[in-house]
Image (tube, rainbow, N blue to C red):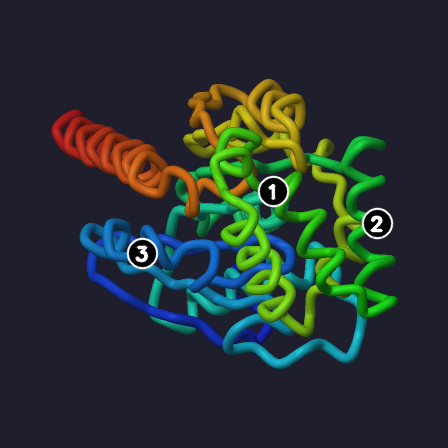
């Protein structure tokens, strides 16, 4: 797709900060506030941050049709452009990592860098089993049961083991009460619509893959597959479960900030060198 053929984005969004563009892509069953709220101030200190909510999350109404990876990627890019960003880095978490990869593949003239955290190119059988359980519990309305499952596999074992019975019960109750209405469509997309393995070799932007090494939902082999598949990708690790914004937000924010700061400096140096050689 070209810059002239972007669709109008229907995604509600938060816009903060000033500086180079940074587009955020959150995870399934999450939202911008839930997944990036803990680190938003750090990111917005050096960037114009555009954080769209997927359909059925946060500021965006639920979709009346199944979601597609292409459609979601285009809608995210469209949201950034509508906020005045011609080019931008993309930070994707979990499902958002696949959305970010597809956005870079479809809009290479706009995406300048990628940061992919707890991401996957496609769901392996173990992850598919978890996603199908997730979907089936949603269909049955078993939200407490679902929140219990996601507490066990979303948080790292050391964090869960450190909770007492009342704290764990409270976490489950809170999780059950805060499931976004669009989560069924998000999970359906994971099960039937995510496979970006073919996109990876063609990506030509600086990329950082952040592995959540204690992740029991999107396990580290998924993260390594992304890093190995993208030419020149850098790889970093955080000793956390699937939710770094809950377990290690400061460390996560610093990895994103420092990578983007370094890439911005490198790009500026290259631009000066090119102008001198001309």
Q: Nearer the viewer, residue 184 or 223?
A: 184
Say whether residue 156 is visible. Answer: yes
Question: Residue 266, how many percent across, how many down?
Answer: 24, 29
Q: Secondary structure at mark 2?
A: helix
Whether residue 201 can be seen here: no
Closer to the camera in the image, 61 or 243: 243
Q: Which mark is residue 53?
A: none
Percent across and percent down for residue 125 are 85, 32
- Cα gap from disc 2 to disc 1, whole angstroms: 14 Å
Q: What's the distance in space between the residues labelled 2 and 3, CA to CA?
A: 31 Å
Circle 2 residue: 133
Q: Residue at x 31, y 32 (%)?
A: 259
Earlier sequence position, callout 2 versus callout 3: 3
**Distance of label 1 from label 3 (alpha carbons):** 21 Å
The answer to which of 9 and 12 lies nearer the viewer is: 12
Residue placed under numbered mark 1 in the picture: 154
**Residue 83, placed above or below residue 220:** below
Question: Residue at horizontal 54%, vertical 33%?
Answer: 161
Residue drawn at point x = 20 percent, y = 33 percent: 265
Q: Is residue 144 left or right of residue 229?
A: right
Locate residue 81 relative to residue 44 in the image: left or right.
Answer: right
Instruction: Name the mark nearer the viewer: 1 or 3.
Output: 1
Image quarter of the N terminus:
bottom right
Q: Secondary structure at mark 3?
A: helix
- Eye-nearest disc, 2 or 3: 2
């Amino acid at each position: 797709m070209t810059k002239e053929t972007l669709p109008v984005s229907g995604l509600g969004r938060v816009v903060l900060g000033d500086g180079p563009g940074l587009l955020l892509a959150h995870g399934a069953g999450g939202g911008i506030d839930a997944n990036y709220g803990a680190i938003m101030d750090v990111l917005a200190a050096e960037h114009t941050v555009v954080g769209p909510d997927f359909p059925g999350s946060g500021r965006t109404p639920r979709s009346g049709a199944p979601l597609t990876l292409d459609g979601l990627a285009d809608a995210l890019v469209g949201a950034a452009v509508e906020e005045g960003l011609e080019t931008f880095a993309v930070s994707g978490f979990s499902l958002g990592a696949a959305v970010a990869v597809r956005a870079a593949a479809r809009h290479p003239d706009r995406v300048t860098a990628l940061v992919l955290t707890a991401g996957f190119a496609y769901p392996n059988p173990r992850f598919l089993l978890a996603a199908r359980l997730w979907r089936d519990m949603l269909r049955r309305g078993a939200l407490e049961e679902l929140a219990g499952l996601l507490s066990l596999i979303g948080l790292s074992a050391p964090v869960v083991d450190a909770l007492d019975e009342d704290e764990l019960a409270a976490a489950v109750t809170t999780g059950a009460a805060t499931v976004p209405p669009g989560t069924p469509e998000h999970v359906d997309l994971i099960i039937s619509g995510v496979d970006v393995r073919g996109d990876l070799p063609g990506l030509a932007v600086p990329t950082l893959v952040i592995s959540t090494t204690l992740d029991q939902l999107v396990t580290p082999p998924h993260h390594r597959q992304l890093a190995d598949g993208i030419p020149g990708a850098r790889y970093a690790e955080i000793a956390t479960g699937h939710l770094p914004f809950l377990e290690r937000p400061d460390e996560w924010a610093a990895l994103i900030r420092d990578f983007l700061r370094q890439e911005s400096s490198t790009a500026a140096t290259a631009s000066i060198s090119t102008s001198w050689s001309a």
